[in-house]
Amino acid sequence: MLYDRWRTMASQQRAERALHEAATGRSWTFGELLAWSDRSSAPPTGRVFPQGLGADFILEVLRGWRHGCCVCPLEVGQEAPRIPPPPPGMVHLKLTSASTGSARMVAFQAGQLAADPAHIVATMGLRPDWPNLGAISLAHSYGFSNLVLPLLLHGIPLVLAASSLPEALRRAAAGEPALTLPGVPALWRAWHEADAIPAGVRLAISAGAPLPLELERTVFQQRGVKIHNFYGSSECGGIAYDRSPQPRSDDRSVGTAMQGVSLDVGADGCLRVRGPNVAETYWPDAAGPLGDGCFQTTDLAEFHGDELHLLGRAGDVIHVAGRKVAPEAIEQTLRHHTAIRDCLVFGVPAARVERGEQIVAVVAGTDLAPGDLAAFAAGSLPDWQVPRQWWVVDSLDPDPRGKLSRREWCQRFLSRRQTGGVSPEP
């Protein structure tokens, strides 16, 4: 199915530019890519593992489709997982980011994989005359669905930057009068601060992590670029999208449901996603909140009209003396501090068992003193929600997918506490 759709689309746009690799200056038309894929050799196994940031990633996907192989994208330097062959009919495996637990594969049938870019193109309005500028991971669900699949199934040209660094972005965008630029919040901040956001950007998208409202407003005010917040998951691809031409008024908002996707909130307060884009199963462990066209997320959510607001993740809720608070609510307050570049909040076991957990805030910025931070937080939060432990760092570096792991930073904090690297609990 996927290769047939590719052949039909590429044949219709045979003479049009399809792919440009900024690092080498090489370009391919759809006809040239089609000719290459038609004559590609069969892989030695029934799976292919596209990897890297260049055109070879695209060619390997086409080779897999051409020979009916299951495609499993990998990050740069990542080893191929040792798993049994997926069930019959599975054409694509995604390795999850493990932000909600242990990493595992998500298996898709062809129709499920193809539904996501169809929703993306229709909802976001991707256009062939606004090529995608690829500066994010092609292997991640976000990059694969927003960059690779629109190219191969919908004829949206792709310009590949050598990396996500500001200078690489400038070089890749040179000579392009109009572009669509998907990024993650950390990259949008870096590009803005380096004055590297291309003048030709007509559509700006941010996903992979919550988009800070202050960053969205600053870029809009100073550069006239509206960054559209996009929310999705490896299990289903796109879920909701902020279609507004103006900055949001509430950073909990992730917009409205993607075209073709149905959303509702279950009795546990968590979001449920239904649609043709929902994956078939996890693999090789099929157990989990996925199946029959429905994905049960762990994201606490509520609707304001048709606008979806995320309230935090159920597994991240902090329990303080019998009360509960989502760390995102505290982070939202802390990000209003002008000297805080980023922050992450989580709970750790309190010294007094009856208090359950204590709240820890890791903040990145300059000239930050714990006492001043606590006073700032106390101005907007009830006393029991003010973090009792503060850890000031130079930066909160996200992973290649733009995500910050509470689990990882919590483990770092606990290790520091064991070695006396943080002050005792007040």
Image (cartoon, helix red, strand yellow):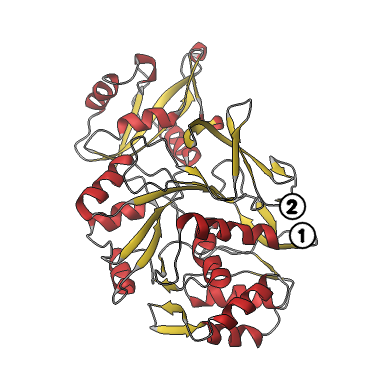
Q: Are marks 1 and 2 in contact (CB under 8 Å)?
A: yes
Relative side of 291 to 36, left or right: right
State the residue at coordinates (74%, 71%). Answer: 46
Report the Cα–Cα distance between label 1 and label 2. Answer: 7 Å
394 w.r.t. 190: above or below: above
**Residue at which label 2 appears:** 284
- Residue 161 in view, yes or no: yes
Q: Secondary structure at mark 1?
A: loop
277 w.r.t. 165: above or below: above
249 w.r.t. 347: above or below: below
Q: Residues within 10 Å of mark 1 (few under 14, many from 20)?
A: few
**Residue at which label 1 appears:** 84
Q: Amino acid at mark 2?
A: Pro
Q: Residues within 10 Å of mark 2 (few under 14, many from 20)?
A: some
Q: Position of residue 307 (x, y in %)?
A: 47, 37
Q: Amino acid at mark 1?
A: Pro
- Closer-to-camera residue (282/20): 20
